[in-house]
Image (cartoon, grey):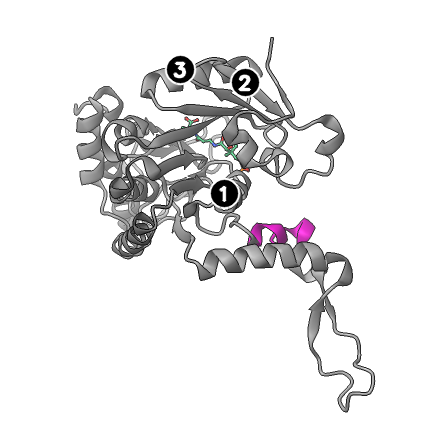
Protein backbone atom coordinates (compact mmCIF):
# COMPACT_ATOMS: atom_id res chain seq x y z
CA UNK A 1 0.00 0.00 0.00
CA UNK A 2 1.28 3.51 -0.86
CA UNK A 3 2.44 5.46 2.22
CA UNK A 4 0.05 8.11 3.52
CA UNK A 5 0.99 11.72 2.78
CA UNK A 6 1.25 12.39 6.48
CA UNK A 7 4.06 9.82 6.78
CA UNK A 8 6.22 11.41 4.05
CA UNK A 9 8.88 14.12 4.25
CA UNK A 10 7.22 17.53 3.62
CA UNK A 11 8.87 18.02 0.19
CA UNK A 12 7.83 14.56 -0.99
CA UNK A 13 4.29 15.02 0.33
CA UNK A 14 4.18 18.29 -1.59
CA UNK A 15 5.07 16.74 -4.91
CA UNK A 16 2.69 13.78 -4.44
CA UNK A 17 -0.19 16.02 -3.34
CA UNK A 18 0.18 18.62 -6.08
CA UNK A 19 0.65 15.98 -8.79
CA UNK A 20 -2.54 14.29 -7.76
CA UNK A 21 -4.80 17.31 -8.27
CA UNK A 22 -5.31 19.40 -11.37
CA UNK A 23 -4.59 23.05 -10.51
CA UNK A 24 -7.73 25.16 -10.03
CA UNK A 25 -9.08 26.58 -13.29
CA UNK A 26 -8.80 30.13 -11.99
CA UNK A 27 -5.14 29.75 -10.95
CA UNK A 28 -3.48 31.15 -14.11
CA UNK A 29 -5.75 34.21 -13.96
CA UNK A 30 -5.11 34.67 -10.23
CA UNK A 31 -1.37 34.33 -10.78
CA UNK A 32 -1.39 36.97 -13.53
CA UNK A 33 -3.35 39.37 -11.31
CA UNK A 34 -1.09 38.71 -8.33
CA UNK A 35 2.10 39.07 -10.37
CA UNK A 36 1.06 42.53 -11.58
CA UNK A 37 -0.15 43.51 -8.09
CA UNK A 38 3.09 42.41 -6.44
CA UNK A 39 5.28 44.12 -9.06
CA UNK A 40 3.46 47.37 -8.45
CA UNK A 41 4.07 47.22 -4.73
CA UNK A 42 7.66 45.99 -5.01
CA UNK A 43 8.37 49.12 -7.06
CA UNK A 44 6.77 51.26 -4.36
CA UNK A 45 8.72 49.39 -1.67
CA UNK A 46 5.40 48.73 0.03
CA UNK A 47 4.73 45.86 2.40
CA UNK A 48 2.33 43.21 1.12
CA UNK A 49 0.35 40.83 3.30
CA UNK A 50 -1.31 37.65 2.15
CA UNK A 51 -4.40 37.29 4.34
CA UNK A 52 -6.17 33.93 4.10
CA UNK A 53 -9.75 33.87 5.28
CA UNK A 54 -12.83 31.65 5.52
CA UNK A 55 -13.21 27.87 5.62
CA UNK A 56 -12.06 25.30 3.09
CA UNK A 57 -14.32 22.51 1.85
CA UNK A 58 -13.59 18.81 1.36
CA UNK A 59 -15.73 17.43 -1.47
CA UNK A 60 -17.09 13.89 -1.09
CA UNK A 61 -17.72 13.41 -4.81
CA UNK A 62 -15.77 14.63 -7.87
CA UNK A 63 -19.01 16.06 -9.24
CA UNK A 64 -19.66 17.59 -5.87
CA UNK A 65 -23.07 17.51 -4.29
CA UNK A 66 -21.91 16.93 -0.71
CA UNK A 67 -18.89 18.34 1.02
CA UNK A 68 -17.47 18.77 4.52
CA UNK A 69 -16.95 22.37 5.54
CA UNK A 70 -14.76 24.11 8.09
CA UNK A 71 -16.25 26.69 10.36
CA UNK A 72 -15.42 30.32 9.53
CA UNK A 73 -17.50 33.29 8.45
CA UNK A 74 -14.38 35.17 7.36
CA UNK A 75 -14.80 37.88 9.99
CA UNK A 76 -11.26 37.60 11.33
CA UNK A 77 -9.67 37.74 7.90
CA UNK A 78 -11.85 40.52 6.49
CA UNK A 79 -11.51 42.69 9.60
CA UNK A 80 -7.76 42.20 9.84
CA UNK A 81 -7.36 43.03 6.14
CA UNK A 82 -8.96 46.43 6.76
CA UNK A 83 -6.49 47.15 9.55
CA UNK A 84 -3.54 46.09 7.41
CA UNK A 85 -4.74 48.46 4.68
CA UNK A 86 -5.04 51.22 7.23
CA UNK A 87 -1.42 50.55 8.22
CA UNK A 88 -0.26 51.06 4.62
CA UNK A 89 -0.01 47.43 3.54
CA UNK A 90 -1.22 46.15 0.20
CA UNK A 91 -3.41 43.10 0.82
CA UNK A 92 -3.85 39.92 -1.18
CA UNK A 93 -7.08 38.58 0.27
CA UNK A 94 -7.25 34.84 -0.41
CA UNK A 95 -10.75 33.99 0.77
CA UNK A 96 -13.46 31.39 0.65
CA UNK A 97 -15.85 32.40 -2.11
CA UNK A 98 -18.86 34.31 -0.70
CA UNK A 99 -17.37 34.68 2.77
CA UNK A 100 -17.02 38.14 4.32
CA UNK A 101 -14.91 40.72 2.48
CA UNK A 102 -13.09 43.79 3.77
CA UNK A 103 -15.43 46.83 3.94
CA UNK A 104 -18.56 45.15 2.56
CA UNK A 105 -18.54 42.93 5.69
CA UNK A 106 -20.08 45.87 7.56
CA UNK A 107 -23.29 45.49 5.56
CA UNK A 108 -23.55 41.89 4.57
CA UNK A 109 -25.25 40.03 7.37
CA UNK A 110 -28.93 39.67 8.08
CA UNK A 111 -28.27 41.60 11.30
CA UNK A 112 -26.76 44.50 9.37
CA UNK A 113 -28.25 44.11 5.93
CA UNK A 114 -27.32 47.06 3.70
CA UNK A 115 -31.01 47.66 2.89
CA UNK A 116 -31.60 48.67 6.50
CA UNK A 117 -29.13 51.50 6.00
CA UNK A 118 -31.01 52.94 3.01
CA UNK A 119 -34.12 55.09 2.59
CA UNK A 120 -36.04 56.76 -0.16
CA UNK A 121 -34.86 60.34 -0.59
CA UNK A 122 -37.19 62.95 0.91
CA UNK A 123 -39.04 65.09 -1.67
CA UNK A 124 -37.00 68.12 -2.84
CA UNK A 125 -38.97 71.22 -1.92
CA UNK A 126 -39.53 73.47 -4.94
CA UNK A 127 -38.21 70.95 -7.49
CA UNK A 128 -40.37 70.23 -10.55
CA UNK A 129 -40.24 66.51 -9.91
CA UNK A 130 -40.38 66.33 -6.12
CA UNK A 131 -40.07 62.56 -5.96
CA UNK A 132 -37.41 61.46 -8.44
CA UNK A 133 -37.19 57.97 -6.94
CA UNK A 134 -33.62 58.32 -5.70
CA UNK A 135 -32.46 56.60 -2.55
CA UNK A 136 -30.10 57.78 0.18
CA UNK A 137 -28.26 56.50 3.23
CA UNK A 138 -30.29 57.14 6.38
CA UNK A 139 -29.12 60.08 8.44
CA UNK A 140 -28.00 58.06 11.44
CA UNK A 141 -25.66 55.91 9.31
CA UNK A 142 -24.13 58.70 7.20
CA UNK A 143 -20.91 59.10 9.18
CA UNK A 144 -20.15 55.43 9.57
CA UNK A 145 -20.97 54.58 5.97
CA UNK A 146 -19.01 57.53 4.57
CA UNK A 147 -16.00 56.41 6.56
CA UNK A 148 -16.20 52.84 5.25
CA UNK A 149 -16.91 54.04 1.70
CA UNK A 150 -13.88 56.33 1.67
CA UNK A 151 -11.55 53.61 2.88
CA UNK A 152 -12.98 51.16 0.36
CA UNK A 153 -12.65 53.65 -2.51
CA UNK A 154 -9.10 54.50 -1.47
CA UNK A 155 -8.06 50.85 -1.45
CA UNK A 156 -9.66 50.26 -4.84
CA UNK A 157 -8.39 53.41 -6.54
CA UNK A 158 -4.84 52.84 -5.33
CA UNK A 159 -4.78 49.15 -6.12
CA UNK A 160 -4.17 48.12 -2.53
CA UNK A 161 -6.55 45.17 -2.34
CA UNK A 162 -6.59 42.05 -4.48
CA UNK A 163 -9.48 39.64 -3.89
CA UNK A 164 -8.85 35.99 -4.80
CA UNK A 165 -11.48 33.32 -4.02
CA UNK A 166 -11.10 29.58 -3.30
CA UNK A 167 -13.57 26.89 -2.27
CA UNK A 168 -11.92 23.50 -1.70
CA UNK A 169 -8.90 22.70 0.43
CA UNK A 170 -7.00 21.65 -2.72
CA UNK A 171 -7.71 25.02 -4.36
CA UNK A 172 -6.55 26.74 -1.20
CA UNK A 173 -3.26 24.80 -1.20
CA UNK A 174 -2.53 25.58 -4.85
CA UNK A 175 -3.32 29.26 -4.38
CA UNK A 176 -1.25 29.53 -1.20
CA UNK A 177 1.77 27.93 -2.83
CA UNK A 178 1.56 30.09 -5.94
CA UNK A 179 1.03 33.33 -4.03
CA UNK A 180 3.92 32.61 -1.66
CA UNK A 181 6.29 31.95 -4.57
CA UNK A 182 5.11 35.03 -6.44
CA UNK A 183 5.76 37.09 -3.32
CA UNK A 184 9.49 36.23 -3.31
CA UNK A 185 10.60 39.55 -4.84
CA UNK A 186 9.12 41.24 -1.75
CA UNK A 187 11.65 39.64 0.61
CA UNK A 188 11.14 40.97 4.14
CA UNK A 189 8.29 43.17 2.91
CA UNK A 190 6.11 40.05 2.71
CA UNK A 191 3.81 38.96 5.52
CA UNK A 192 1.63 35.84 5.69
CA UNK A 193 -1.43 36.02 7.93
CA UNK A 194 -3.13 32.65 7.80
CA UNK A 195 -6.58 33.04 9.32
CA UNK A 196 -8.40 30.65 6.96
CA UNK A 197 -9.87 27.59 8.66
CA UNK A 198 -8.13 24.79 6.80
CA UNK A 199 -9.53 21.25 6.77
CA UNK A 200 -7.42 18.73 8.66
CA UNK A 201 -8.90 15.74 6.82
CA UNK A 202 -9.66 15.02 3.20
CA UNK A 203 -10.42 12.26 0.70
CA UNK A 204 -7.47 11.75 -1.65
CA UNK A 205 -8.54 12.22 -5.25
CA UNK A 206 -7.76 8.65 -6.27
CA UNK A 207 -10.31 7.41 -3.72
CA UNK A 208 -13.06 9.85 -4.53
CA UNK A 209 -16.20 8.72 -6.35
CA UNK A 210 -17.26 10.55 -9.49
CA UNK A 211 -21.01 10.71 -9.00
CA UNK A 212 -23.40 11.64 -6.25
CA UNK A 213 -23.34 9.07 -3.44
CA UNK A 214 -26.63 7.18 -3.40
CA UNK A 215 -28.50 6.39 -0.23
CA UNK A 216 -30.99 3.88 -1.62
CA UNK A 217 -30.91 0.81 -3.85
CA UNK A 218 -30.43 1.38 -7.58
CA UNK A 219 -31.45 -0.86 -10.48
CA UNK A 220 -28.60 -3.37 -11.15
CA UNK A 221 -27.53 -1.67 -14.41
CA UNK A 222 -26.64 1.51 -12.46
CA UNK A 223 -24.88 -0.12 -9.53
CA UNK A 224 -21.53 -0.41 -11.32
CA UNK A 225 -21.19 3.27 -12.34
CA UNK A 226 -22.38 4.88 -9.18
CA UNK A 227 -20.91 2.37 -6.76
CA UNK A 228 -19.48 3.83 -3.60
CA UNK A 229 -17.87 0.55 -2.80
CA UNK A 230 -18.41 -2.00 -0.11
CA UNK A 231 -17.09 -2.48 3.38
CA UNK A 232 -13.29 -2.10 3.42
CA UNK A 233 -13.34 0.68 0.80
CA UNK A 234 -12.65 4.26 1.77
CA UNK A 235 -16.19 5.41 1.31
CA UNK A 236 -18.96 2.92 1.37
CA UNK A 237 -22.63 2.69 1.89
CA UNK A 238 -24.04 -0.25 3.71
CA UNK A 239 -27.13 -1.47 5.47
CA UNK A 240 -27.94 0.25 8.69
CA UNK A 241 -27.76 -2.75 11.02
CA UNK A 242 -29.77 -1.01 13.69
CA UNK A 243 -32.69 -0.65 11.29
CA UNK A 244 -32.63 -3.39 8.69
CA UNK A 245 -34.38 -2.35 5.48
CA UNK A 246 -33.94 1.35 6.23
CA UNK A 247 -31.84 3.74 4.13
CA UNK A 248 -28.13 3.01 3.81
CA UNK A 249 -25.59 4.49 6.18
CA UNK A 250 -22.59 6.30 4.78
CA UNK A 251 -19.10 5.54 6.10
CA UNK A 252 -16.25 7.86 5.14
CA UNK A 253 -12.57 7.26 5.73
CA UNK A 254 -10.57 10.50 5.64
CA UNK A 255 -6.81 11.02 5.42
CA UNK A 256 -4.95 13.80 7.22
CA UNK A 257 -4.24 16.83 5.02
CA UNK A 258 -0.46 17.28 4.69
CA UNK A 259 0.76 20.14 6.87
CA UNK A 260 2.05 22.56 4.29
CA UNK A 261 2.98 25.24 6.79
CA UNK A 262 6.37 23.54 6.84
CA UNK A 263 6.77 24.04 3.11
CA UNK A 264 5.53 27.62 3.31
CA UNK A 265 8.08 28.53 5.96
CA UNK A 266 11.00 26.51 4.58
CA UNK A 267 10.42 26.68 0.86
CA UNK A 268 7.71 28.81 -0.69
CA UNK A 269 7.84 32.07 1.28
CA UNK A 270 10.52 34.69 0.63
CA UNK A 271 13.54 34.79 2.93
CA UNK A 272 13.05 37.26 5.71
CA UNK A 273 9.26 37.29 5.45
CA UNK A 274 7.04 36.93 8.49
CA UNK A 275 4.55 34.08 8.94
CA UNK A 276 1.62 34.31 11.35
CA UNK A 277 -0.73 31.36 11.71
CA UNK A 278 -3.93 30.89 13.71
CA UNK A 279 -4.88 27.97 15.88
CA UNK A 280 -8.52 27.24 16.53
CA UNK A 281 -9.62 24.98 19.36
CA UNK A 282 -12.78 24.39 21.35
CA UNK A 283 -11.21 22.91 24.50
CA UNK A 284 -9.55 25.66 26.60
CA UNK A 285 -7.21 23.08 28.15
CA UNK A 286 -5.66 22.38 24.74
CA UNK A 287 -5.33 25.78 23.12
CA UNK A 288 -1.97 26.99 24.42
CA UNK A 289 -0.39 23.55 24.14
CA UNK A 290 -1.52 23.16 20.52
CA UNK A 291 -0.45 26.67 19.56
CA UNK A 292 2.98 26.15 21.15
CA UNK A 293 3.40 22.82 19.41
CA UNK A 294 2.58 24.44 16.05
CA UNK A 295 5.15 27.18 16.65
CA UNK A 296 7.83 24.64 17.56
CA UNK A 297 6.97 22.37 14.66
CA UNK A 298 7.01 24.99 11.92
CA UNK A 299 9.48 27.50 13.42
CA UNK A 300 7.58 30.52 12.20
CA UNK A 301 7.04 33.81 14.00
CA UNK A 302 3.69 33.88 15.71
CA UNK A 303 0.73 31.63 16.42
CA UNK A 304 -2.48 33.38 17.41
CA UNK A 305 -4.67 31.00 19.37
CA UNK A 306 -8.40 31.39 19.76
CA UNK A 307 -11.32 29.39 21.08
CA UNK A 308 -14.45 29.04 19.02
CA UNK A 309 -16.68 30.36 21.80
CA UNK A 310 -14.58 33.38 22.81
CA UNK A 311 -12.74 34.24 19.58
CA UNK A 312 -14.43 37.63 19.28
CA UNK A 313 -12.98 38.96 22.53
CA UNK A 314 -9.87 37.07 23.38
CA UNK A 315 -6.85 35.69 21.56
CA UNK A 316 -3.53 34.43 22.81
CA UNK A 317 -0.22 35.25 21.15
CA UNK A 318 2.36 32.49 21.28
CA UNK A 319 5.82 33.71 20.31
CA UNK A 320 9.30 32.16 20.23
CA UNK A 321 10.62 34.98 22.44
CA UNK A 322 9.46 36.27 25.82
CA UNK A 323 6.76 36.69 27.01
CA UNK A 324 5.96 33.50 24.96
CA UNK A 325 2.27 33.69 25.92
CA UNK A 326 0.27 36.87 25.90
CA UNK A 327 -3.49 37.31 26.03
CA UNK A 328 -5.32 40.17 24.37
CA UNK A 329 -8.81 40.66 25.70
CA UNK A 330 -11.62 43.06 24.97
CA UNK A 331 -12.86 44.38 28.31
CA UNK A 332 -16.26 42.97 29.33
CA UNK A 333 -17.98 46.34 29.07
CA UNK A 334 -17.18 46.58 25.37
CA UNK A 335 -18.03 43.03 24.41
CA UNK A 336 -21.76 43.42 23.81
CA UNK A 337 -21.11 46.13 21.24
CA UNK A 338 -18.62 44.01 19.41
CA UNK A 339 -19.88 43.04 15.97
CA UNK A 340 -16.66 41.73 14.63
CA UNK A 341 -14.02 41.04 17.18
CA UNK A 342 -10.75 41.77 18.82
CA UNK A 343 -9.38 43.66 15.81
CA UNK A 344 -12.22 46.21 15.85
CA UNK A 345 -11.89 46.63 19.57
CA UNK A 346 -8.18 47.15 20.07
CA UNK A 347 -6.96 47.62 16.49
CA UNK A 348 -4.60 45.42 14.57
CA UNK A 349 -1.84 48.02 14.77
CA UNK A 350 -1.92 47.63 18.52
CA UNK A 351 -1.87 43.88 18.17
CA UNK A 352 1.12 44.13 15.83
CA UNK A 353 3.01 46.47 18.09
CA UNK A 354 2.45 44.03 20.87
CA UNK A 355 1.95 46.81 23.35
CA UNK A 356 -1.75 47.39 23.36
CA UNK A 357 -4.10 47.87 26.20
CA UNK A 358 -6.24 46.06 27.05
CA UNK A 359 -4.07 43.03 27.53
CA UNK A 360 -3.61 40.50 30.22
CA UNK A 361 -0.95 37.88 30.67
CA UNK A 362 -2.26 34.65 32.05
CA UNK A 363 -0.69 33.69 35.31
C1 LIG B 1 -8.84 30.81 13.07
O1 LIG B 1 -8.58 30.37 14.14
C2 LIG B 1 -9.70 32.05 12.87
O2 LIG B 1 -9.43 32.98 13.86
C3 LIG B 1 -11.22 31.69 12.89
C4 LIG B 1 -11.97 32.98 12.59
C5 LIG B 1 -11.53 30.65 11.81
C6 LIG B 1 -11.65 31.16 14.25
P1 LIG B 1 -14.27 33.84 11.80
O3 LIG B 1 -13.88 33.73 10.36
O4 LIG B 1 -13.35 32.79 12.59
O5 LIG B 1 -13.97 35.21 12.35
O6 LIG B 1 -15.69 33.38 12.03
N1 LIG B 1 -8.39 30.17 11.98
C7 LIG B 1 -7.83 28.85 12.16
C8 LIG B 1 -7.05 28.43 11.26
C9 LIG B 1 -6.66 27.01 11.11
O7 LIG B 1 -7.40 26.19 10.64
N2 LIG B 1 -5.41 26.79 11.45
C10 LIG B 1 -4.75 25.54 11.23
C11 LIG B 1 -4.80 24.72 12.46
O8 LIG B 1 -5.35 25.14 13.50
C12 LIG B 1 -3.30 25.83 10.92
S1 LIG B 1 -2.98 27.01 9.69
O9 LIG B 1 -4.27 23.59 12.40
Nearest to the eye among marks 1 and 2: give it. 1
Q: Which of marks 3 and 2 is nearer the N terminus?
A: 3
For the N terminus, the quadrant is top left
Q: How crowded is mark 3: few (under 14 residues within 10 Å), some or many (20 or more)?
A: some
Does 255 sit above or below residue 97? above
Q: Mark 1 points at which residue?
A: 87
Which region shows up in magenta?
104-112
Q: Which of 165 and 277 is in front in this view?
A: 277
Q: Name the residue under label 3.
A: 293
| Crowding at mark 2 (Cα within 10 Å: few <14, some 14-19, many 20+) | some
The relative height of residue 363 versus residue 181 in the rendered view (above or below) is above
- Residue 70 screen position, x and y as percent: 47, 36
Q: Which of 11 and 341 is in front in this view?
A: 341
Image location of residue 79, percent across then percent down = 55, 42
Question: Is residue 179 rendered to the left or right of residue 163?
Answer: left
Alpha carbon distance from label 3 to label 1: 30 Å
Between discs 3 and 1, the one toward the N terminus: 1
Of all residues, the one furthest to the right in this rendering is 125
Give the mark nearer the N terminus: 1 vs 2.
1
Kindly report the distance in space between the C-alpha atoms of the residues bearing marks 1 and 2.
22 Å
Pick the residue in front: 134 or 61.
Answer: 134
Name the residue carrying label 2: 326
Q: Can residue 110 be seen in this view?
A: yes
Circles 1, 2 touching at the beta carbon (< 8 Å): no
Whether 164 is drawn above or below 331: the answer is: below
Q: Which of 104 and 158 is in front in this view?
A: 158
- Let me know if residue 107 is in the magenta part: yes
**Quadrant of the rendered image containing residue 177:** top left
Answer yes or no: do the residues labelled 3 and 2 have beta carbons within 8 Å? Answer: no
| Residue 286: x %, y % from top left | 51, 14
Residue 228 shown left or right of residue 358 in the figure: left
Mark 3 to mark 2: distance in Å? 16 Å
Amino acid sequence: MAPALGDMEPAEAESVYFNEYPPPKALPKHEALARAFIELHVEANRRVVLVTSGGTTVPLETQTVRFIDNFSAGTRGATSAEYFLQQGYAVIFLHRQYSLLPYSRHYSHSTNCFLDFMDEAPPVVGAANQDDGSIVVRDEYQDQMRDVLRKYRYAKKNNRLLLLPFTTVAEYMFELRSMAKLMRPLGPNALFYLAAAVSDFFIPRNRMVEHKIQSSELPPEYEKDSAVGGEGDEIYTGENEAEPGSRKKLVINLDPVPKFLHRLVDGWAPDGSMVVSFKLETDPALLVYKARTALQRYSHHLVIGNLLSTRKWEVVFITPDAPHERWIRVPKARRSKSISGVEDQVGLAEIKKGGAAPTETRQ
